[in-house]
Structure formats: structure tokens, C-alpha cells
Image (cartoon, grey):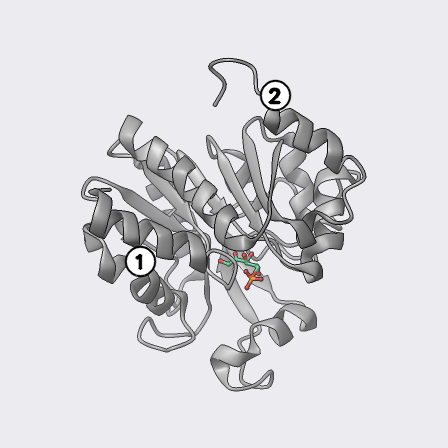
Amino acid sequence: MEILIEKDRESAAAKAADLVARHLRRKPDAVLGLATGETPRGLYRELVRRHAHEGLSFARVTTFNLDEYLGVAPEHPGSYHRYMRDVLVDHVDVDPSRVHLPDGLTTNVEATCAAYEESIRRAGGIDLQVLGVGRDGHIGFNEPSSSLGSRTRVKTLTPETRRDNAAAFGGEEQTPKHVLTMGIRTILETKRCLVLAFGETKAEVVRRMVEGPITASVPASALQLHEHVHVFLDEAAASRLERRDYYRFVSLNKPEASE
Ligand code: F6R
């Protein structure tokens, strides 16, 4: 894992946007895996800005989101379909027919999940996957105890995650209990991951993701098995990392011609 510690979330988001932009320059028809939530908002803002002012184009890009709430319509203000339109899709030149999220209104969960995996495969796999991390260690909505070999399927949210996401639904009671999410294996099969985590509330889970043992109890720790992971942190999220001085040393002393 490459661990990058920035002074605040704005500069971390700008560095993460550099990585995305570098990829799109190299491969304009890249397949991007996208996350929702509070954490990547700054990254999307920066990508929209670069589209408007620096000619960054998404015209040939295909996207696949990690997850969607089961039983929630795309028009619902709490849906991830709506989130993606608000933060990115409506503000860049991506072709909406190449924007994919799991269908939260499906009546055949199994077939929908299998078809989602199949469309990722047909697109050639995900080149760059954006990830946030839940306080309980989830990536996508692979909650603790998720199989490290899992693929897209239905998952039940933990009470902690439902509490964290309650604002978009007007309270915990109204927050859906189930989601469709890419699995941990789906995520491990992506070619490169870009993980974002900010703030003191993520410090402990970041420590467990980066330095803890690989365990289904902390699904994000499975990323230690992935060959190309870039973790962008602010100071607060990095504060519990035992080897943070080493990670800083590494990022200041990159070998020539490295990514
Ligand atoms: C969202 C997702 C989740 C979030 C995580 C962190 O698509 O898959 O794993 O990344 O819940 O959420 P925030 O960023 O709101 O703290």
C-alpha cells in the first residue's frame, strides 16, 4: 500500500484527483469504480472543476458504483443514483448510459447481482476503484464478517452504518436495512484502488486497515492483499498509524519512474 498523508482533506482530495486525471490521460476510456458518502465529495468537486477549467474529459469513461440501497428508487434523495448525479454525472461529459449502479428496485436480487458482475467483466474490469471506509471497517457495504471471497450480493447494514447514513433518510428508523454491494473479491479484482479516509473518527479503522491483521472482521484489511492501493489521508485519519513517519519518508523518497 502507498500511504499518503496530507495536511487536510482538501489537499488529499486534490492529490487523489491528480491520480484519477493521470489515469484518464493515459486511458481516456478507463473504467472507474466509484464510491459515495461524505468522504469522496471533495474528490468529485475537484474532478468537476478540472472538467470545467482544465479540459479533463469523461466522454469515453465507464463507471460502476460500489453499492445502492435495496428498495430505494433512483429519484429518492437518499439514493446513490441521485448522489452520483448531484456530485458528478450532471456536471461532467460522461455518457449517462455508461454510468452503472446496482438496481435498488430489483425484484430478482440474485440475477441483478450476477448481471452487475457480468457487466463489469464485459467492460474489461475496473481500472481504478475509489473507496471510502466505514468506521466499522466496511468497504463498499461489506460489513464485518463479509466473506473475503464475496461478489456483488445483498448485505444487511450494521446499526452503526445505518446511524451514520440516517441523515439522508430523515432518521435511523427510515434508513434501509439492506443494500446491494460489490463484494470484497470484486474489489480485489480491480486493477488499482484509491482509498480516501479523513478525520479523527476514521483513525482507528485506518490503523486496522493498514497495519492490522487481514480479517473478515475488518473488511478493509483485505486491501492488504491488493497489489496497487493508494491511501489518501489527512493528518487526523493518519494519527494512529504506528509507522506514519516511515510512510511520509517513502512518499518523499519515491524511486524514479514509480506511479
Ligand atoms: C459508499 C460506500 C461506503 C462508504 C463508507 C464511508 O459507496 O461504499 O463504504 O465509503 O461508508 O462513508 P463516509 O464517506 O460517508 O464516511
Three-letter code, disc 1: Leu
Res. 244 in view: yes
| Residue 89: quadrant of the picture | bottom left
- Residue at 44% from the left image edge and 57% from the top image edge: 42
Measured from the top left, where is residue 26 in percent x and y?
A: 30, 26
Query: Which residue in the protein does label 2 denote?
Result: 253
Query: Which residue in the protein does label 1 denote?
Result: 88
Three-letter code, disc 2: Asn
Measured from the top left, where is residue 194 in percent x and y?
A: 50, 40
Callout 2: helix, strand or loop? Answer: loop
75 up-or-down from 55: above or below: below
- Residue at 18% from the left image edge and 43% from the top image edge: 59
60 up-or-down from 168: above or below: above
Asked whether disc 2 touches disc 1, contact meaning CB atoms under 8 Å apart, the reply is: no
Residue 142 — which label? none
Asked whether, in this view, residue 136 is left or right of residue 77, the answer is right
175 up-or-down from 7: above or below: below
Say which quadrant the N terminus sits in.
top right
| Residue 83: quadrant of the picture | bottom left
Residue furthest top in the image: 256
Mark-to-mark CA distance, 2 and 1 = 34 Å
Q: Give whichever of discs 2 and 1 has the lower sequence position.
A: 1
Mark 1 closeness class: few <14, some 14–19, many ≥20 residues within 10 Å: some
